[in-house]
Image: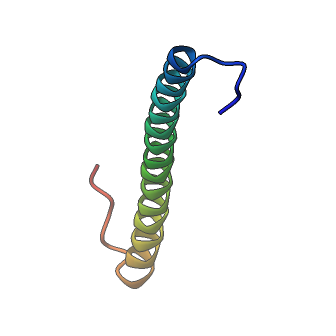
Amino acid sequence: MNSKINPAEYGRLMDAAKLQAQQLRRQASEEFWSGTGRAAVRVLQAARRRAWRLLRRVAPEHRHEA
């Protein structure tokens, strides 16, 4: 602890820093999972398109009904 900062001020600064750290962790977690969800959706959409292409190739009479 810096001797020029009184204990009450130091405690206040530590509390503020801990609160900010908690908020930043929450924000990072939300951004990570949001990005992960978007990536998963893109992968699933691409897999679905490939599956439909394969199905049309092996069973041309089958048409997409969506």
Expressed as whole percent of the image width and height from the top left, the position of residue 41 reads 42, 53
The relative height of residue 34 versus residue 8 in the rendered view (above or below) is below
Between 7 and 28, which is closer to the camera in this rendering? 7
Residue located 53% across and 27% down the image? 14
Q: Residue 26 vs residue 65: left or right?
A: right
Q: Residue furthest front?
A: 3
The relative height of residue 18 versus residue 56 in the rendered view (above or below) is above
The relative height of residue 51 versus residue 58 in the rendered view (above or below) is above
Expressed as whole percent of the image width and height from the top left, the position of residue 15 reads 46, 25
Q: Residue 62 vs residue 44: left or right?
A: left
| Quarter the N terminus occupies | top right
Quarter of the image holding residue 55?
Answer: bottom left
Expressed as whole percent of the image width and height from the top left, the position of residue 52 reads 40, 68
The total of numbered circles placed on residues is 0
Q: Residue furthest left?
A: 65
Between 29 and 24, which is closer to the camera in this rendering? 24
Residue located 57% across and 22% down the image? 10
The relative height of residue 53 versus residue 32 in the rendered view (above or below) is below
Residue located 45% across and 34% down the image? 22
